[in-house]
Image (cartoon, grey):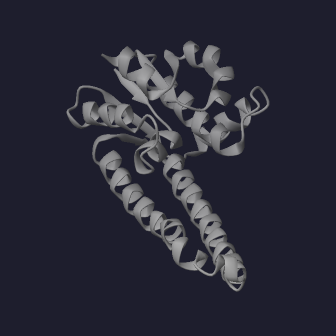
């Protein structure tokens, strides 16, 4: 069975979000060669881009928080605030390092066992054809076009497209036309795979 995933799969694992255990179980099935995992190349770029944006946002928040706390600590009732808030400020900085490390490990695991769909001229053409039909953001449009084109080329095998992004629901009928079932959520996908 082919199981296609996208950016949210990478982020779910790297950031250890709610369905990380189910996503990891899917990845382990691919590592054991019990399923064929497929992921668009653009999903790696999107994951790194989202992590960089999140890191910048948290660094700005860290700086703003430190500045505000220093200002507040000048007042006698809040003199201890700088020391008591240190763990929160430290967490804002350290989580960036942890997430970057986890993203790198997740990407390595995926590249080792998944087929990465390259961003080709065919995919770009597919995206330009599908973009007016669906109201997807450009990253999602490239992801969907990659998976749609891949499934067309491999000849309608039984396959799943697993995502947490409800924006892809509008693509379910077109996906079915090339042999794919849209599954929302990694837990639901794991149940369907088994």
Image location of residue 187, percent across then percent down: 42, 24
Image location of residue 75, percent across then percent down: 72, 83
Instruction: Indicate whether 69 appears above or below 6.
Output: below
Picture quadrant where residue 160 is located = top left
Pick out the residue farthest to the bottom: 74
Image location of residue 157, percent across then percent down: 41, 16
Q: Quadrant of the N terminus?
A: top left
Q: Residue at x 63, y 81 (%)?
A: 79
Viewer-side residue, 64 vs 118: 64
Q: Residue at x 46, y 34 (%)?
A: 5
Viewer-side residue, 77 vs 68: 77
| In-image side of 29 versus 87 (left or right) | left
| In-image side of 84 versus 190 (left or right) | right
Instruction: Indicate whether 135 appears above or below 66.
Output: above
| In-image side of 51 versus 65 (left or right) | left
Viewer-side residue, 193 vs 33: 193
Q: Quadrant of the C terminus?
A: top left
Q: Residue at x 60, y 75 (%)?
A: 81
Q: Residue at x 58, y 78 (%)?
A: 80
Picture quadrant where residue 148 is located = top right
Viewer-side residue, 115 vs 26: 26
């Amino acid at each position: 069975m082919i199981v296609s995933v996208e950016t949210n799969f990478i982020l779910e694992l790297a950031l250890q979000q709610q369905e990380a255990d189910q996503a990891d179980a899917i990845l382990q099935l691919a590592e054991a060669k019990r399923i064929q995992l497929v992921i668009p190349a653009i999903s790696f770029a999107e994951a790194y881009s989202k992590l960089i944006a999140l890191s910048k946002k948290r660094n700005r928040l860290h700086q703003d928080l430190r500045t505000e706390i220093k200002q507040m600590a000048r007042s006698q009732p809040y003199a201890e605030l700088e020391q008591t808030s240190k763990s929160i400020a430290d967490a804002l900085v350290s989580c960036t390092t942890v997430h970057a490390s986890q993203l790198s490990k997740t990407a390595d695991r995926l590249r080792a066992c998944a087929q990465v769909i390259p961003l080709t001229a065919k995919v770009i053409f597919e995206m330009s054809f599908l973009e007016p039909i669906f109201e997807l953001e450009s990253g999602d449009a490239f992801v969907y076009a990659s998976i749609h084109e891949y499934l067309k080329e491999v000849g309608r095998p039984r396959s799943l497209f697993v995502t947490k992004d409800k924006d892809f629901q509008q693509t379910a009928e077109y996906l079915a036309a090339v042999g794919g079932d849209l599954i929302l959520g990694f837990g639901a996908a794991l149940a369907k795979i088994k």
